[in-house]
Image (cartoon, coloured by chain):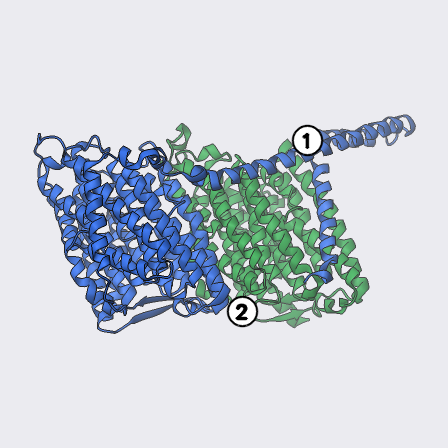
Chain colours: A blue, B green
């Protein structure tokens, strides 16, 4: 209980305090992150020892707020807290000179608190609330430098994309609550049959939005407009991870059809996003595309029926990707940009940081004995063992080759040129990054026990799997290091540079049709208006005819009254310009329709 | 008789308050009128608390003291007080200022009658009482736009009111009683039932601004003082829903009204948000958004008698809607009537901007804000009642609504226009915005206190 409170409330309290006090936000950030980490460690230790904590708070009658730390959620909470602590340490150095520090650290801490709430939530409504909160907090963080051109637009786009896909989560939650009669997640996962299939596919839609799966991948690249620590946190253990976490948690419920869809979406994404990463000309955007690609691999694992393996890769990727981003941020500081051309040779100026970056890059490519080697092999093994192996295995292998290729290319560019400059040391940034690199290297050793704890037995993998894993990793690295992407991708280079904007991307699929429909409604009202206006004119002509007759026949005593009425009528006519006729005509049509629908009631099924 | 009157104390207090206000207005003491009004509303709110769970009827069943009418008072009376404060901020010092306050309280009395109606005649009385006062309120500014708006409102009211009374007379003919609780007798007389029902839906649908009876709303709101637009968009509208709920609770569901209302609900929310998407005038935009919100409230009415979440849904969402819509209108009163007036608000007035964002997100229905709690009940009720397709349309429209509301949020981050920096919110409006904000944020979290 105390650990749970500490995990959630320490970042939240520190964030609010940083915003309220506005002084020394770094200190609040460190304290909040450290206490949160302590709380998450306590939760994890408790869960590992077999004590599940669950707290129910009163909220709506029959829908209490439920917080739950079982083995899975405690692991995730620890991951979030650990990455957050490292990133916040780094951010102290990165944001040292920014005037908006208090706002930055305050929002970032609240974001961490919301993410902890998301992973620890035990009912759908709390999950929905936390889901929205991380969406909104990430909007604020991506738009942190909102005065710079294009940043506000990128933040809005990220928010809208993920929000549209959130629709799936809302619908899925309502379907599950409606079917199971409770909002607690655990009982709803026992849903079977058609509702499970529908809910599973809807959850997949939500996860595709948050985890940037094809065709909703575009926002992730644009979200690079935010500060680098934000990207590091968003991409590793939080916002983007939320989609995969959702599917990992819901995996027990997913029927075979939904699992196949999950696997195929993940497989397509891992290949497509991998090609986008290879074609990128900007280091941060390259890393962003690689994030989408790696989450695609996790979805492949979920689709292959091995959610624990997906979790392992999520953990490995969290440590690796945050180290890569933090390294990229240091190079960005040195060269005032993240374009790959501007960064050429940046690694030589900082051999220490480059070494860390390179280790993380090799880890991402899946070289032993780093963390992703084990998780990627496990994914390949799961894909091989799954009934959909002919689909999943080639895509997983393709994604792995591409991981090696784009990381090899990035390393080659960072190391090119000659050593020309030396830079002042960056202690905070290096400390944060160093901690994550160490994690990236050593985490793999803990995967075996973790897998056992989560109840997925480590089966003996066929010898072909590590061979394939090593082969694709090394092969990819060599290809990327030595061959230019234009030759690797051939005719696919141009679409990859465009981010494979399928059918104009989200803009074309959702935004434009909605606006067109709105314009159509407007035009419909206008057309109707013109038609009714003509009728109105005819009526007015008849009216004026009557008026003339009246003037000639009605005696002088009531003449004044009539004159006044006519004058008023004229005024109203000028003001109304026929509108009210049209509206009343529509109203009458509505009444007729209403009566028709009501009368047809006995014939409804 | 004495027992009956004791249950009616809140209504009596409101009626007496309105009379006292008219008397005070004769002395041209506008501030006194306002003070009497606020005090009367506060007393009436407090007097509601003891009878909140009475669950009875008075005057031989013609007036109901039940969950709906009790919570309606707790929602409408404070909402009216907030609207009075907003009106004071807008029209202080004008001629006939006090008359407007008195009219507002009279209209609220009509709204209370609608919410407690147990008899078709009380429904008619409520419609007339709210209508007559509202026409005068809309025309208060006496300019062309106001006159046009009031004229349109009046013509619409006259037509729909006539249709309603005509239809309701069929019910009387068919059941031999004007009591709503006797409507069950209409079983087996489908034509009579349908005619009356259509009349009722038209009459109350006009008040509540359903599609296609909503055409007056944007013009009336635009022509009226903004505070009156805010008042009409929440008080008379929610009262119409309460009346609809009172009437339909006693009507057999097999009469087909759930499906007809579900169609209207879907059309209302979709049309409202689509039309709001192309508005550039903030008042018109909020007017269409209010139309769309009617569609959501209607989801609760559709589920009446089929889901235990229906009545709590209507009550909770009505409360949330009153708070967030009044808050949004109050911000518009501070800032200006055009969309471009919002440029740079986030830079110059961050607190005001945050308040507006909270109101808009709550209108969208984002957890954990109050609006989400209401929508949760409404969606649950609709799904329980077998209207999954309606819930799907509702959720789809939530996304559309986000596009509508983000049109307000996005310009707040731009470079501020010149006049904005010097602008400051009047004290009264700040109070209203703070109260609405507390309700929107706080009641979302303390939702356990609500009925259900």
x then y, percent, for residue A411: 17, 39
Q: What numbered label is drawn on residue A575?
A: 1
The chain identifier of the residue carrying mark 2 reads: B
Q: At 80% from the left edge and 67% from the top edge, which residue is drawn?
A: B176
| Mark 1 or 2, closer to the camera | 1
Residue B72 visible in the current orientation: yes
Residue A132 visible in the current orientation: no
Q: Give the structural element (helix, strand or loop) at label 2.
A: helix
- Marks 1/2: CA–CA distance: 50 Å
Q: At 39% from the left edge and 55% from the top edge, which residue is drawn?
A: A262
x then y, percent, for residue A127: 38, 59
- Comparing A163 with A449, the one in front is A449
Residue found farthest to the bottom: A50
The residue at which mark 2 appears reads as: B50
Q: Determine which quarter of the picture holds residue A587.
A: top right
The quadrant of the rendering that contains the N terminus of chain A is bottom left
The quadrant of the rendering that contains the C terminus of chain A is bottom right
Residue found farthest to the front: A464
Crowding near the residue tagged with mark 1, few <14, some 14–19, many ≥20 C-alpha atoms within 10 Å: some
Q: Determine which quarter of the picture holds residue A32.
A: bottom left
Q: In this view, does B329 lie above or below A464?
A: above
Q: At 21% from the left edge and 40% from the top edge, which residue is drawn?
A: A479
């Amino acid at each position: 209980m105390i650990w749970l409170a500490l995990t959630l409330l320490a970042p939240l309290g520190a964030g609010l305090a940083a915003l309220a006090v506005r002084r020394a936000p770094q200190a609040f950030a460190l304290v909040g992150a450290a206490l949160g980490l302590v709380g998450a460690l306590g939760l994890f230790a408790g869960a590992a020892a077999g004590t599940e904590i669950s707290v129910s708070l009163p909220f709506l009658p029959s829908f209490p707020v439920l917080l739950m730390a079982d083995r899975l959620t405690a692991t995730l909470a620890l991951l979030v807290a650990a990455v957050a602590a490292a990133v916040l340490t780094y951010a102290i150095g990165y944001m040292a000179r920014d005037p908006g520090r208090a706002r930055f650290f305050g929002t970032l801490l609240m974001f961490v608190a919301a993410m902890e709430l998301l992973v620890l939530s035990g009912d759908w409504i709390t999950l929905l609330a936390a889901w929205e909160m991380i969406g909104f907090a990430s909007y604020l963080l991506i738009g942190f430098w909102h005065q710079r051109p294009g940043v506000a637009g990128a933040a809005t786009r990220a928010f809208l994309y993920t929000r549209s896909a959130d629709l799936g989560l809302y619908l899925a939650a309502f379907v599950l609550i409606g079917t199971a009669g409770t909002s607690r997640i655990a009982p709803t996962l026992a849903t079977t049959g058609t509702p499970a299939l529908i809910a599973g596919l809807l959850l997949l839609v939500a996860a595709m939005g948050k985890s940037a799966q094809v065709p909703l991948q575009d926002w992730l690249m644009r979200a690079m407009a935010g500060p680098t620590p934000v990207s590091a946190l968003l991409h590793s253990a939080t916002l983007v991870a939320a989609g995969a976490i959702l599917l990992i948690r819901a995996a027990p419920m997913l029927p075979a059809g939904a699992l196949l869809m999950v696997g195929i979406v993940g497989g397509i994404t891992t290949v497509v996003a991998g090609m986008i990463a290879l074609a990128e000309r900007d280091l941060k955007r390259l890393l962003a595309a690689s994030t989408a690609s790696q989450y695609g691999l996790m979805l492949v694992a979920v689709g292959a029926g091995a959610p624990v393996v997906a979790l392992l890769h999520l953990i490995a990727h969290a440590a690796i990707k945050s180290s890569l981003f933090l390294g990229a941020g240091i190079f960005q500081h040195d060269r005032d940009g993240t374009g790959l051309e501007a960064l050429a040779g940046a690694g030589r100026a900082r051999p220490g940081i480059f070494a860390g970056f390179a280790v993380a890059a090799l880890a991402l490519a899946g070289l032993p004995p780093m963390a992703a080697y084990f998780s990627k092999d496990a994914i390949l093994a799961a894909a091989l063992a799954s009934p959909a192996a002919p689909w999943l295995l080639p895509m997983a292998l393709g994604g792995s080759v591409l991981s090696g290729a784009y990381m090899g290319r990035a390393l080659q560019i960072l190391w090119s040129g000659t050593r020309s400059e030396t830079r002042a040391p960056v202690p905070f940034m290096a400390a944060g990054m160093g901690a994550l690199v160490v994690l990236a290297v050593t985490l793999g050793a803990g995967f075996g026990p973790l897998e056992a704890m989560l109840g997925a037995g480590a089966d003996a993998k066929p010898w072909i799997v590590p061979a394939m894993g090593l082969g694709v990793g090394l092969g990819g690295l060599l290809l990327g290091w030595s061959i230019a992407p234009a030759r690797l991708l051939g005719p696919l280079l141009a679409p990859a540079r465009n981010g494979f904007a399928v059918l104009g991307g989200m803009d074309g699929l959702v935004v434009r049709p909605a606006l067109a429909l709105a314009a159509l409604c407007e035009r419909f009202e206008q057309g109707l208006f013109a038609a009714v206006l003509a009728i109105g004119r005819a009526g007015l002509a008849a009216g004026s005819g009557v008026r003339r007759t009246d003037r000639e026949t009605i005696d002088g005593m009531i003449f004044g009254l009539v004159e006044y009425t006519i004058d008023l009528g004229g005024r109203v006519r000028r003001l109304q310009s026929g509108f009210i006729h049209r509206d009343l005509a529509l109203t009458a049509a509505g009444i007729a329709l209403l009566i028709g629908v009501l009368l047809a009631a006995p014939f409804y099924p | 008789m004495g027992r009956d009157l004791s249950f009616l104390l809140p209504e009596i207090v409101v009626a007496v308050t309105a009379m006292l206000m008219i008397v005070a207005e004769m002395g041209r003491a506008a501030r006194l009128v306002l003070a009497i009004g606020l005090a009367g509303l506060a007393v009436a709110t407090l007097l509601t608390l003891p009878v909140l769970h009475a669950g009875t009827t008075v005057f031989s069943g013609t007036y109901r003291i039940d969950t709906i009418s009790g919570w309606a008072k707790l929602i409408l009376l404070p909402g009216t007080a907030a609207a009075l404060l907003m009106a004071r901020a807008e029209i202080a010092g004008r001629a006939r200022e006090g008359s407007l306050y008195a009219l507002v309280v009279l209209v609220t009395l009509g709204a209370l009658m609608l919410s407690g109606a147990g008899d078709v005649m009380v429904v008619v009385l409520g419609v007339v009482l709210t209508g007559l006062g509202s026409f005068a309120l809309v025309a208060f500014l006496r300019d062309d736009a106001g006159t046009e708006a009031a004229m349109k409102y009046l013509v619409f009211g006259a037509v729909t009111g006539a249709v309603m009374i005509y239809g309701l007379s069929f019910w009387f003919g068919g059941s031999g009683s004007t009591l709503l609780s006797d409507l069950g007798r209409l079983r087996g007389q489908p034509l009579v039932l349908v005619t009356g029902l259509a009349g009722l839906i038209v009459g109350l649908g006009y008040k509540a601004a359903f599609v296609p009876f909503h055409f007056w709303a944007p013009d009336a709101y635009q022509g009226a003082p903004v505070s009156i637009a805010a008042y009409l968009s929440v008080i008379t509208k929610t009262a119409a829903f309460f009346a609809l709920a009172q009437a339909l609770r006693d009507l057999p569901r097999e009469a087909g009204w759930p499906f007809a209302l579900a169609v209207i609900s879907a059309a209302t929310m979709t049309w409202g948000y689509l039309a709001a998407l192309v508005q550039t005038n903030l008042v018109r935009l909020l007017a269409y958004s209010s139309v769309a919100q009617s569609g959501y409230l209607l989801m609760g009415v559709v589920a009446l008698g089929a889901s235990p979440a229906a009545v709590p849904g209507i009550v909770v969402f009505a409360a949330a809607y009153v708070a967030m819509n009044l808050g949004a209108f109050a911000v518009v009163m501070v800032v200006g009537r055009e969309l471009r007036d919002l440029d740079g608000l986030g830079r110059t007035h961050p607190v005001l901007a945050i308040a507006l964002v909270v109101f808009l997100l709550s209108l969208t229905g984002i957890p954990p804000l109050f609006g989400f709690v209401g929508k949760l009940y409404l969606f649950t009720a609709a799904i329980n009642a077998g209207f999954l397709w309606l819930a799907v349309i509702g959720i789809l429209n939530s996304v559309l609504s986000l596009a509508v509301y983000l049109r307000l949020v996005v310009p707040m981050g731009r470079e501020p226009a010149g006049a904005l920096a010097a602008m400051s919110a009047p004290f009264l409006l700040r109070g209203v915005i703070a109260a609405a904000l507390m309700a929107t944020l706080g009641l979302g979290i303390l939702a356990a206190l609500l009925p259900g």
